[in-house]
Structure formats: structure tokens, C-alpha cells
Image (cartoon, rainbow, N blue to C red):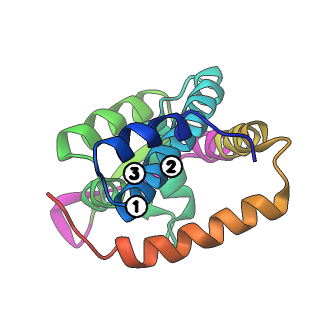
């Protein structure tokens, strides 16, 4: 296997006296970060062609997969790790573009529902197709078996590491 840019860091970590388990963890984190950056850059480029930001896409996708087809802004913010101010700004932009509607919650006068418009559903579908293209472009040439093995290995790692919560 051909060495990568992370491999070049290993000798320095060894010279610094880091344990082999810590070095392996650093390699994992660096490679995950690198993969994330590759996917994120490709996805953002595809979404930009549709006139969407990543946050706007996240909201459209969350609404598209919501069982009832609608969510409260607070539910969206929580599920997408956005602040209440952040979700308000995104919803305002999506509303201005005609992609979402807000309607009063008959059971709670202080709350509102957010749902996709017909145009918003079409944009969500187009954005999902565009992000699929981005993932395919980034992974092109990588054997499917390698991707499957990496995804399974990362599931195993995440099952252990994912239980930890940090501030």
C-alpha cells in the first residue's frame, strides 16, 4: 500500500515518545478528517450549483425524511446541531426561496411547524441526487470492497467511541 500524508507524521510522533495505540488513534483521526474534507468540498460544490448552503440542504433533507413531513424549528435545530438563531436564519432563507412553509401549531400557540413546499420537495430531491454524485465522484476508483470494509470498521470504532460525550 502506498504511504499517504498521514504516514509522514508517524516518525515525528514516534520520536516524541507517543505510544503505538495513541499513534494509531491519531492516524485514524487524521484520515477521517481528510476524508470528511474531501466529501465536504465535493458536496458543497454540488450544492452551490443549486444555490444551497450545506445547512440549507441539511434542513431540506431532514424535512424530506421526517415521517410526518414536518418538524418544529426546535426539533430541526436539535437534530442538526444548530442553534435556535442558526435554524431561524436558515428557515428564513428557505422560506424566502419558497422551499418551506411555516404554519401555526394548533396544539401550542407558541410553536410553529415547518414543512416542505412542492418546490422545496423538488429541491430536496435534486440536492440529494447532487450529493450522491459528490460521494460517487470522491469514491471513484476505490474498490467497493475497500469502502465496505472501511465503513464496517468505522462502525465498530464508533460503537465504542460514540458513547463518549464532550462539551
Q: First in sequence, mark 2 or 3: give its number.
A: 3
Name the front one of labels 1 and 2.
1
Image quadrant where residue 108 sits: bottom left
- Image coordinates for residue 141, horizontal then vertical, percent: 86, 42
Write down the region rendered in magenta. Answer: 106-125
For the point 49% across and 56% down, the residue is 63
Tell me if residue 138 comes above or below residue 115 in the rendering. above
Going from N to C along the chain, the mark reached first, 1 or 2, is: 1
Q: Is residue 49 above or below residue 130?
A: above
Q: Which residue is mark 1?
A: 20
- Secondary element type, mark 3: helix
Q: Which mark is residue 41?
A: none
Task: Give the CA separation, mark 1 to mark 2.
Answer: 18 Å
Q: Residue at x 58, y 22 (%)?
A: 48
Q: Nearer the viewer, residue 116 or 150?
A: 150
Residue located 30% across and 62% down the image = 75
Residue at horizontal 36 percent and vertical 71 percent from the top? 162
Q: Nearer the viewer, residue 137 or 124?
A: 137
Q: Position of residue 76 (x, y in %)?
A: 34, 56
Q: Which mark is residue 32?
A: 2
Instruction: Provide the residue designation for mark 3.
Output: 26
Give the position of the C terminus as an image quadrant. bottom left
First along the sequence among labels 3 and 1? 1
* Image depth: mark 3 or mark 1 in front: 1
Disc 1 secondary structure class: helix
- Give percent across and percent down for residue 85: 18, 39
Amino acid at each position: 500500500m502506498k504511504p499517504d500524508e498521514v504516514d509522514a507524521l508517524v516518525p515525528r510522533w514516534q520520536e516524541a515518545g507517543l505510544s503505538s495505540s495513541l499513534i494509531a488513534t491519531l492516524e485514524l483521526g487524521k484520515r477521517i478528517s481528510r476524508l470528511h474534507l474531501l466529501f465536504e468540498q465535493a458536496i458543497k460544490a454540488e450544492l452551490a450549483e443549486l444555490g444551497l448552503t450545506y445547512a440549507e440542504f441539511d434542513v431540506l433533507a431532514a424535512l424530506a425524511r421526517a415521517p410526518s413531513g414536518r418538524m418544529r424549528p426546535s426539533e430541526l435545530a436539535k437534530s442538526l446541531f444548530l442553534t435556535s438563531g442558526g435554524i431561524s436564519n436558515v428557515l428564513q432563507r428557505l422560506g424566502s426561496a419558497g422551499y418551506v412553509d411555516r404554519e401555526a401549531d394548533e396544539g401550542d400557540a407558541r410553536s410553529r411547524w415547518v414543512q416542505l413546499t412542492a418546490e422545496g420537495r423538488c429541491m430536496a430531491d435534486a440536492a440529494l441526487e447532487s450529493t450522491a454524485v459528490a460521494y460517487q465522484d470522491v469514491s471513484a476508483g476505490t474498490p467497493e470492497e475497500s469502502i465496505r470494509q472501511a465503513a464496517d470498521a468505522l462502525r465498530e470504532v464508533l460503537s465504542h467511541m460514540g458513547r463518549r460525550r464532550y462539551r
